[in-house]
Image (cartoon, grey):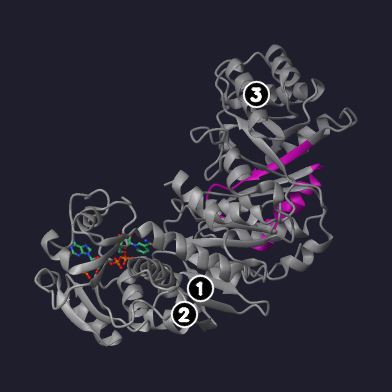
C-alpha cells in the first residue's frame, strides 16, 4: 500500500462502496476465574454486546479442556478467544506451545474467533490449515503501545498481516495526538479485508466511537470502568447509549466538543439524545484536542467534522482557524461554536453571550410583565458585570449590544478597564463595586469564579448592596444555587441561574449545527437528571 495523505477529506467519498453490515461490539471478559467470566458474559449480553472476548491470560488458574468447554459452550454470545502474552502487552507468561494449543482447542470447541499475534500468526495459521470449522475466523493482531506510525508503515503492516493468512486484520496503535486516528481510519476505509483499527489512549477515543463510520469489523467496549483491556477503551454501555453506536453509518455527520480536558463535558449526552429524538444521522463525540489548527486541517471533510463546540483552552486560539466569524464573537475574542458550511469553510459563533443575555432578558420581562415583542428590556439599564474573563466579555458585549449602560468590575482593574473601554462602559475594582449604587433597579451579572465549587461559601459582592439590583445573574452553575443568588433572593431581586445560560447556549449551538430548533424540554430534562 502506498503512502496516504494525512487529510481525511477523501474518506467520505471512499466510504460509498463500503460494506453496510454494522460494526460488532465486543466486550472483553477480564475476570480472574471462570465463574467471574460466566457472570460477565451474562452482563455483556444484557448490555447489548454482540461478541465476548474471553481473555484467557486474565485467568489465575486455567485447565484448558474443562474451562474452555464451560466458557465457550455456556456463553450466550459468540466468543472470541485471546490469550495475550506478556510480549504483546498481555498477562500470559507461560509456555508458547501450550498457549497456541489452547487457542486451537478453543477453535475445535466452537469459538467463533481466536486472536493471534502477528509475530506467531504464520506458524499458528499453518498449524490449523484444512482444519478450520466453517464460520470460524482468525484475527491476526499487532499492538503498538508507543505511537501510531506513518500511513506507509501502517500500510506495510496491514500487508504483512494479510500475508499471514488472517481472516481479520487487527491493528492497535497508540495516539499521541487525536489526528493519529486519521491514519487508522484511512487504513480501514481502504482495506480489502475485514479490519479492526484501534488507536489506544484517551486521544484515540474517536477511533473506537466512530469505528462504524469507517467500516471497522468490530470494536471493543468494556463492561465496567475498572475492567478495560486496553488504554482508552470506552464502556460498552456508553458506546450504545451515550454515543448511539448502532446508528452510526459511513455517511453519519460527526460533531463534537474540542477541549483539553474534555471528558467531563455533558454535551455529547445532550446532542446525541437530541439527534436521536428527531432521527438525524449525526453523532457528537468528545474530542481531546492539543493542536486546534492541526485538528481542523486533518479532519477537513464536510461530514467530519461537520461542527464543533469549543471549550477551554481553545476558545481564543480557534478563532485563527476560521473562515468567517460572527461579528460579536469577533469583538468578544472568543468562540464556542463552529459550523462547517457545505463548501467546507468554517464559521464561528459565540453562543455564550446569546444564552446569558436571552436568559436575563426573559427574567426582566417577567419582572416588568413586558411584551416580548417590544425591544430589549436591557436597553437603558445599568448593567454591572463582575469579572472580565471569557464569560465577562460575553456578558459585557452582549449587554452593550442591547443598549445597556455597562459597568465592568474586576479584581484586576487593568482587565476591567480594557473591557470597559471596548464596550464604552465604566471600570471599577471589586472593592469599589461594594459601594456602587448610583441608582436602584440595576442588573448584576457575576462572571467571576468566586462562589464556585468547592468554595461555595464565598460571594463576590456584599449582601447589603444587593438591594439596589432588581435582577442578579450568576454564570456559575456548580452549584446551581450559589450564595450570591441566595442572598439576592433574600434581597428581593429576581434571580437567573448559570444553568440557564448553559442550556440556552446549547439551544443556539444545536440551531447552528442543524438549522432546527433545539428540543428544549429534552435538553432541560437531561440537564436536570445529570446535573
Ligand atoms: P476566566 O476567563 O478565567 O475569568 C475568571 C474571572 O474570575 C476573572 O475576571 C478573574 O479575575 C475572576 N476571578 C477569579 N478568581 C477570583 C478571585 N479569587 N477573586 C476575584 N475574582 C476572581 O473564566 P471564565 O471562563 O470567564 O469563567 C468564569 C466563571 O463563569 C466560571 O465559574 C465558569 O464556570 C462560569 N461560566 C459559566 C458559563 C455558563 O454557561 N453558565 C459559561 C462560561 C463560564 P482576574 O481578571 O483578576 O483574574
**For numbered disc 2, what is the local secondary structure?**
helix
Q: Closer to the observer: label 3 or label 2?
A: 3
Coordinates of residue 80 in the picture (x, y in percent): 72, 31
Note whether ligand 1 is within 8 Å of mark 2: no
Q: Quadrant of residue 465?
A: bottom left
Q: Residues within 10 Å of mark 2 (few under 14, many from 20)?
A: few
How many marks overall?
3
Q: Is residue 127 visible?
A: yes
Q: Identify the residue under disc 1.
A: 293
Q: Residue 150: image x %, image y %?
A: 62, 62
Q: Is residue 8 above or below residue 160?
A: below
Q: Are marks 2 and 1 in contact (CB under 8 Å)?
A: yes
User: In whole angstroms, how far apart are the C-alphas of marks 3 and 2?
Assistant: 51 Å
With 263 as the anchor, is 37 left or right in this view?
A: right
- Which image quarter holds the N terminus? bottom right
**CB under 8 Å between callouts 3 and 1?**
no
Q: Quick check: 264 left or right of 79? A: left
Give the residue pinned by disc 3. 42
Q: Which residues are magenta?
A: 138-167
Disc 3 versus disc 1: nearer the observer = 3
**Mark 2, residue position:** 320
| Above or below, comparing residue 447 to residue 25 in the picture | below
Amino acid at each position: 500500500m502506498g503512502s496516504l495523505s494525512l487529510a481525511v477529506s477523501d474518506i467520505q467519498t471512499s466510504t460509498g462502496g463500503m460494506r453496510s453490515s454494522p460494526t460488532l461490539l465486543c466486550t472483553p471478559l477480564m475476570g480472574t476465574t471462570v465463574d467471574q467470566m460466566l457472570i460477565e458474559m451474562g452482563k455483556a449480553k444484557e448490555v447489548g454486546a454482540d461478541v465476548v472476548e474471553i481473555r484467557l491470560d486474565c485467568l489465575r488458574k486455567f485447565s484448558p479442556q474443562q474451562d474452555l468447554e464451560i466458557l465457550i459452550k455456556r456463553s450466550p454470545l459468540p466468543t472470541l478467544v485471546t490469550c495475550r502474552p506478556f510480549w504483546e502487552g498481555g498477562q500470559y507468561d507461560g509456555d508458547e506451545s501450550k498457549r497456541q494449543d489452547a487457542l486451537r482447542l478453543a477453535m475445535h470447541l466452537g469459538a467463533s474467533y481466536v486472536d493471534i499475534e502477528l509475530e506467531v500468526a504464520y506458524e499458528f495459521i499453518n498449524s490449523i490449515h484444512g482444519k478450520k470449522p466453517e464460520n470460524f475466523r482468525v484475527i491476526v493482531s499487532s499492538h503498538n503501545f508507543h505511537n501510531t506510525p506513518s500511513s506507509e508503515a501502517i500500510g506495510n503492516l496491514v500487508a504483512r498481516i494479510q500475508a499471514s493468512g488472517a481472516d481479520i486484520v487487527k491493528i492497535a496503535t497508540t495516539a499521541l495526538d487525536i489526528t493519529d486516528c486519521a491514519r487508522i481510519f484511512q487504513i480501514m476505509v481502504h482495506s480489502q479485508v475485514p479490519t479492526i483499527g484501534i488507536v489506544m489512549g484517551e486521544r484515540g477515543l474517536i477511533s473506537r466511537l466512530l469505528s462504524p463510520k469507517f467500516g471497522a469489523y468490530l470494536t471493543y467496549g468494556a463492561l465496567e470502568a475498572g475492567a478495560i483491556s486496553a488504554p482508552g477503551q470506552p464502556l460498552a454501555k456508553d458506546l450504545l447509549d451515550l454515543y448511539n453506536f448502532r446508528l452510526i453509518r459511513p455517511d453519519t455527520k460527526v460533531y463534537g466538543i474540542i477541549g483539553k480536558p474534555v471528558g467531563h463535558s455533558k454535551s455529547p449526552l445532550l446532542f446525541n439524545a437530541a439527534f436521536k429524538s428527531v432521527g438525524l444521522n449525526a453523532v457528537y463525540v468528545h474530542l481531546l484536542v492539543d493542536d486546534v489548527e492541526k485538528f481542523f486541517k486533518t479532519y477537513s471533510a464536510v461530514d467530519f467534522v461537520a461542527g464543533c463546540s469549543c471549550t477551554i483552552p481553545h476558545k481564543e486560539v480557534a478563532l485563527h482557524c476560521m473562515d468567517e466569524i460572527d461579528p460579536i464573537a469577533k469583538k468578544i475574542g472568543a468562540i464556542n461554536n463552529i459550523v462547517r458550511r457545505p463548501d467546507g469553510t468554517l464559521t464561528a459563533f459565540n453562543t455564550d453571550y446569546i444564552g446569558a443575555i436571552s436568559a436575563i432578558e426573559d427574567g426582566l420581562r417577567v419582572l416588568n410583565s413586558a411584551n416580548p415583542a417590544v425591544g430589549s428590556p436591557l436597553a437603558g439599564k445599568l448593567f454591572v458585570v463582575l469579572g472580565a474573563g471569557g464569560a465577562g466579555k460575553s456578558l459585557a458585549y452582549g449587554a452593550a449590544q442591547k443598549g445597556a449602560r455597562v459597568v465592568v468590575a474586576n479584581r484586576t482593574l487593568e482587565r476591567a478597564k480594557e473591557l470597559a473601554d471596548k464596550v464604552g462602559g465604566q471600570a471599577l475594582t471589586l472593592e469599589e463595586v461594594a459601594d456602587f449604587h448610583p441608582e436602584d433597579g440595576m442588573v448584576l451579572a457575576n462572571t467571576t469564579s468566586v462562589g464556585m465549587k468547592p468554595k461555595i461559601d464565598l460571594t463576590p459582592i456584599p449582601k447589603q448592596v444587593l438591594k439596589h439590583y432588581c435582577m442578579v445573574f450568576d454564570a456559575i452553575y456548580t452549584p446551581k444555587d450559589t450564595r450570591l443568588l441566595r442572598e439576592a433572593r433574600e434581597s428581593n431581586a429576581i434571580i437567573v441561574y448559570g444553568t440557564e445560560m448553559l442550556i440556552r447556549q446549547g439551544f443556539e449551538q444545536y440551531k447552528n449545527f442543524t438549522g432546527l430548533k433545539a428540543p428544549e424540554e429534552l435538553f432541560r430534562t437531561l440537564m436536570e437528571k445529570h446535573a
